[in-house]
Amino acid sequence: MDQKRSPIKHISDTARWMAYYQAMESERPNACFHDPYARLLAGLRGKVIAHMLPWGINNAWAIIVRTCIFDEIIVRTVENSAVDTILNLAAGFDTRPYRLPLPPRSIGSRSICPRFLLKKKRNWRTNDPDAASHESRWT
């Protein structure tokens, strides 16, 4: 697919695309993880991107499996090691700080484009009554 016809126009499009995969998995009856924010963060744009790419839906499993593996690595590392800070680089619309069972001592930090963070917060404030608690989980 050439760049002119690609549905990905901005880096935030990749975040929405990945969030759509998270939503696909979360909505399965026997899902490996549940991300209650994925559908909201993906929006229609994430769905459109996934369906426009020739391999967009068929290869979703790879991202879903990757998510499961990294979730497991993060949770086990925090449980079994003296971890007190987690740095989530290039976080995009990642919601691990809000959906993983991490102990309160796990002070989080994220490195995220300010525009992404604004969009994420705006969506939560509009659609989630617990938004304030999510925002304070990782600073």
Image (cartoon, helix red, strand yellow):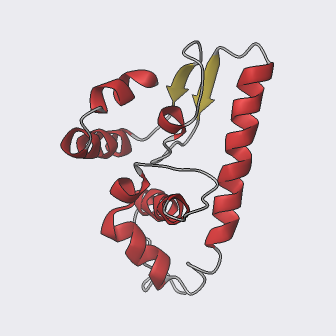
Q: 114 above or below 108?
A: below
Q: Position of residue 78 (x, y in %)?
A: 71, 23
Quadrant for the C terminus in the image: top left
In-front residue for pair 75/63:
75
Q: Position of residue 103 (x, y in %)?
A: 59, 19
* Residue at position x 51%, y 33% in the image: 97
Q: 122 above or below 74?
A: below
Number of marks in picture: 0
In-front residue for pair 16/30:
30
* Residue at position x 46%, y 64% in the image: 20
Q: Is residue 139 left or right of residue 125?
A: right
**Based on the displayed image, in which of its 4 quarters is residue 75 positioned?**
top right
Q: Position of residue 33 (x, y in %)?
A: 59, 50
Please say whether residue 104 is visible from this viewpoint.
Answer: yes
* Residue at position x 64%, y 60% in the image: 64
Please say whether residue 9 is visible from this viewpoint.
Answer: no
